[in-house]
């Protein structure tokens, strides 16, 4: 029948489309995380090493001494976050979970122990339930062994909660600014309390808002994490496909940027003559050319607002597999934050 023929055509179309989006350069999906970690370490052996007690913990190739340790952890699928930001002036260790999944308590505990230099450890955590809960338990285990710890929970995604409930916001690309600033001040040898204070200051001064245009595909699941129309975008969608503020039709870059810019500036309270740093981040598939179009418009808006942009960072800093989309992050600067943001560091994914 005609109806049956139409159904067959639709099935063939969807099947062909599915096969196209499933193309990935991998081996066994179950080995995806371990192989990517191994490749990262072999590509940068002067920066990264695997922990002797846990193959899901990455550390510095050369252990530091006499400084506060800086640790993070989170699911795979977001490189350079989380693992990529290990290095001098950045992190000391990172616990690596499966794709979009929290590391275990034991993995986080291992990361803390490997980062410990005798002066305490600061854990910088994206605000996701599993990450926070597991790090809290890992910190309790560390304290029981005499390792002093403190936690900074990054919550920069303005789409995920109102300003009055900022503690509920997700942690996304802004966490890289916290990694950098905390890592830099830790290198000076100050106390855990001082590192915590400066990292908290950076955390309070970051705001991020993004937009998603296509889903990502988990290697083991083999299918998109969410559905979105070819002509649609979602403002504020999370890096795992969490709901955003609104879904709408794709519009010109300037109009999109103006919308995001207004929301970020209003939420942050940044005003004329303030000094800031900006991060224009690809969620994975959006190319640099498009990011620079976005950067052009953001900087035009900043000029019109008489806000002083000290530095624009453009690139893939916090991704979500092959998701198309981008985020804009602002960091309001003072002399202290500015000093540590621009300190030298050794990390393959960061250039001052």
Image (cartoon, helix red, strand yellow):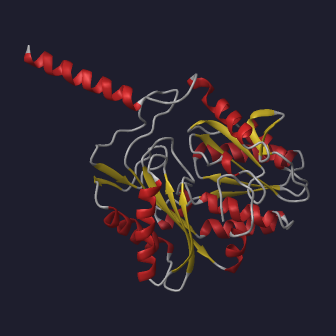
Residue 293 percent coordinates (x, y): 41, 63
In the image, taking residue 6 as reference, residue 81 lies left or right, namely: right
Residue 228 is at least partly visible in this image: yes
- Residue that sits furthest to the top in the current view: 1
In the image, taking residue 86 as reference, residue 36 lies left or right, namely: left
Q: Identify the image quadrant of the N terminus.
A: top left
Residue that appears at 78% across and 51% down: 92
In the image, taking residue 305 as reference, residue 76 lies left or right, namely: right
Residue 150 percent coordinates (x, y): 76, 57
Residue 159 is at least partly visible in this image: no
Q: Identify the image quadrant of the C terminus.
A: bottom right
Residue that appears at 81% across and 43% down: 141
Residue that appears at 58% across and 48% down: 128
Closer-to-camera residue (352/98)? 352
Closer-to-camera residue (267/339)? 339
Closer-to-camera residue (125/1)? 1
Relative to 39, is 182 above or below?
Answer: below
Residue 176 percent coordinates (x, y): 63, 58
Relative to 251, is 201 above or below?
Answer: below
Relative to 268, is 350 above or below?
Answer: above
Residue that appears at 71% across and 54% down: 347
């Amino acid at each position: 029948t005609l109806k049956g023929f139409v159904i067959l055509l639709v099935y063939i179309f969807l099947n062909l489309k599915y096969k196209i989006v499933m193309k990935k350069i991998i081996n066994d999906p179950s080995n995806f995380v371990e192989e990517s970690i191994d490749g990262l370490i072999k590509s940068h052996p002067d920066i990264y090493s695997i922990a002797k007690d846990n193959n899901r913990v990455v550390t510095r190739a050369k252990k530091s001494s006499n400084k506060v340790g800086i640790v993070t952890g989170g699911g795979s699928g977001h490189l350079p976050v989380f693992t990529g930001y290990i290095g001098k002036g950045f992190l000391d260790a990172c616990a690596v979970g499966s794709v979009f999944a929290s590391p275990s308590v034991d993995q986080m505990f291992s990361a803390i122990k490997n980062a410990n230099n005798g002066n305490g450890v600061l854990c910088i955590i994206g605000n996701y339930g599993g990450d926070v809960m597991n790090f809290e338990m890992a910190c309790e285990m560390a304290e029981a062994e005499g390792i002093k710890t403190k936690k900074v929970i990054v919550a920069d995604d303005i789409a995920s909660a109102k300003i009055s409930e900022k503690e509920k916001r997700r942690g996304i690309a802004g966490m890289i600014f916290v990694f950098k600033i905390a890592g830099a001040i830790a290198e000076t040898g100050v106390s855990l309390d001082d590192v915590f204070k400066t990292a908290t200051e950076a955390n309070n001064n970051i705001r991020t808002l993004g937009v998603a245009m296509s889903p990502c595909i988990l290697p083991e699941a083999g299918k998109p994490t969410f559905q979105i129309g070819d002509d649609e975008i979602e403002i504020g969608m999370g890096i795992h496909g969490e709901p955003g503020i609104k879904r709408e039709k794709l519009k010109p870059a300037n109009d999109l940027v103006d919308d995001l810019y207004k929301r970020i500036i209003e939420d942050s309270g940044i005003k004329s003559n303030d000094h800031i740093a900006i991060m224009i981040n690809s969620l994975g598939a959006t190319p640099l050319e498009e990011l620079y179009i976005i950067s052009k418009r953001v900087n035009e808006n900043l000029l019109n607002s008489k806000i002083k942009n000290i530095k624009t960072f453009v690139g893939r800093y916090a991704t979500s597999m092959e998701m198309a989309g981008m985020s804009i992050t602002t960091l309001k600067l003072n002399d202290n934050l500015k000093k540590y943001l621009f300190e030298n560091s050794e990390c393959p994914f960061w250039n001052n």
